[in-house]
Image (spheres, rainbow, N blue to C red):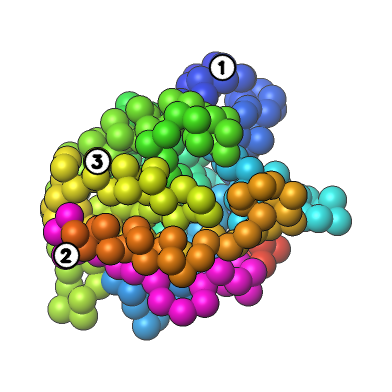
């Protein structure tokens, strides 16, 4: 890694190699909060066996409503540190162990600030027999140049497209350039992996699924996101419209974010997607906005 870190759009320029902490909240030492089979991704990712999910500590976006805020901060409510430091060698072993447990894929969650280390670990693991698809699961706030390090290593990109509005992305994620960067990143992802491919079980082996989390009071921006994705990619990518927004303790007094998304709000966004012509889309049904869907980040499997 360069002395001045510019891996993500923050371009904070911190010398993470020498133990200094970047905007992401991490040095260059890889910390993993959880590595285990995960059942709560899209059906074509989790399947019946589960996705071999590796949750990395830290985050380059740090949304104020984040349901995984403990691993973003790297510490629990008690103040105890979350996650374990792993070497590139150990990260390689984790990938192979998850494959041995029957994982449908390796699912890398919020690894932007560790892209060089992840790439090295993947190369080593593939040399030692890692064959299942690699999923890169991200907020979407990426630099296309950094994603190029993963070209040929990642099979499935699973990015968010959170906002179009500069005002919302500034208020909620301190990133008024979110859409500018996320749209360029998505273009690079599609360039790398192309159209979706599936195995005989219906599990995705290659392609892009763009997630959009519907937020309370923000259906207008949600529709703008869908317009952009449809007009740019149409059914060449898959869409996942999520209703699982969970008001967390740190946001309990916010005028909008302190409540769940209503059924009417979610239905508006889904109906709009259908009116555009989306066919390759996932929607959520039932009660998914529960803290019970948020796994415990205590170093499991690390």
Q: Which residues are magenta?
A: 276-294
Along the viewing direction, whichever of 102 and 199 lies nearer the viewer: 199
User: Which residue sits at x=44%, y=55%?
Assistant: 213
Task: Give the secondary structure at mark 1.
Answer: loop
**Label 1, residues with CA under 10 Å away: few <14, some 14-19, many ≥20:** some
Location of residue 189 with respect to 89 vertically, above or below: above
* Residue picked out by circle 3: 228
Location of residue 28 with respect to 234 vertically, above or below: above
Where residue 205 appears, as percent x and y from the top left, is 22, 63
Task: Give the secondary structure at mark 2.
Answer: loop
Q: Name the image quarter holding the C terminus.
A: bottom right
Where residue 116 appears, as percent x and y from the top left, is 44, 35
Which of the 4 image quadrants contains residue 43? bottom left
User: Which residue sits at x=42%, y=34%?
Assistant: 165
Give the CA separation, mark 2 to mark 3.
Answer: 16 Å
Q: Is residue 154 visible?
A: no
* Residue picked out by circle 2: 279
User: Which residue sits at x=32%, y=48%?
Assistant: 223
Q: Earlier in the sequence, mark 1 or mark 2?
A: 1
Label 1 or label 2, whichever lies nearer to me, is 2
Residue furthest bottom as drawn:
48
**Label 3, residues with CA under 10 Å away: few <14, some 14-19, many ≥20:** few
Q: Earlier in the sequence, mark 3 or mark 1?
A: 1
Residue furthest right as drawn:
78
Look at the image and say whether residue 269 sits in the magenta stretch.
no
Look at the image and say whether residue 286 sits in the magenta stretch.
yes
* Residue picked out by circle 1: 13
Give the CA separation, mark 1 to mark 2.
Answer: 42 Å
Q: Is residue 285 visible?
A: yes
Where residue 207 appears, as percent x and y from the top left, is 21, 55
């Amino acid at each position: 890694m360069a002395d001045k870190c510019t891996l993500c759009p923050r371009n904070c320029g911190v010398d993470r190699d020498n133990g200094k902490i970047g905007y992401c909240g991490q040095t260059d030492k890889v910390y993993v909060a959880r590595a285990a089979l995960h059942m709560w991704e899209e059906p074509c990712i989790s399947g019946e066996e589960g996705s071999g999910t590796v949750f990395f500590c830290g985050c380059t976006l740090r949304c104020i409503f984040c349901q995984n805020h403990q691993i973003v901060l790297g510490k629990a409510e008690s103040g105890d540190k979350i996650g374990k430091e792993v070497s590139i060698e150990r990260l390689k072993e984790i990938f192979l162990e998850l494959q041995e447990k029957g994982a449908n894929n390796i699912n890398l969650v919020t690894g932007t600030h560790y892209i060089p280390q992840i790439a090295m670990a993947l190369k080593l693991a593939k040399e030692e027999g890692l064959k299942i698809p690699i999923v890169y699961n991200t907020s979407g706030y990426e630099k296309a140049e950094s994603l190029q390090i993963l070209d040929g290593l990642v099979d499935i990109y699973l990015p968010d497209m959170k906002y179009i509005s500069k005002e919302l992305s500034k208020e909620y994620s301190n990133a008024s350039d979110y859409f500018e960067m996320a749209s360029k990143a998505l273009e690079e992802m599609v360039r790398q992996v192309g159209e979706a491919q599936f195995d005989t079980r219906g599990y995705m082996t290659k392609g892009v699924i763009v997630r959009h989390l519907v937020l309370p009071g923000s259906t207008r921006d949600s529709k703008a996101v869908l317009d952009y994705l449809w007009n740019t990619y149409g059914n060449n990518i898959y869409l996942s419209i999520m209703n699982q927004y969970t008001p967390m303790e740190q946001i309990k007094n916010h005028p909008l974010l302190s409540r769940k998304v209503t059924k009417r709000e979610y239905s508006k966004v889904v109906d709009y997607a259908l009116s555009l012509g989306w066919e390759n889309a996932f929607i959520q049904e039932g009660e998914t906005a529960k803290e019970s869907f948020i796994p415990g980040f205590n170093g499991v499997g690390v």
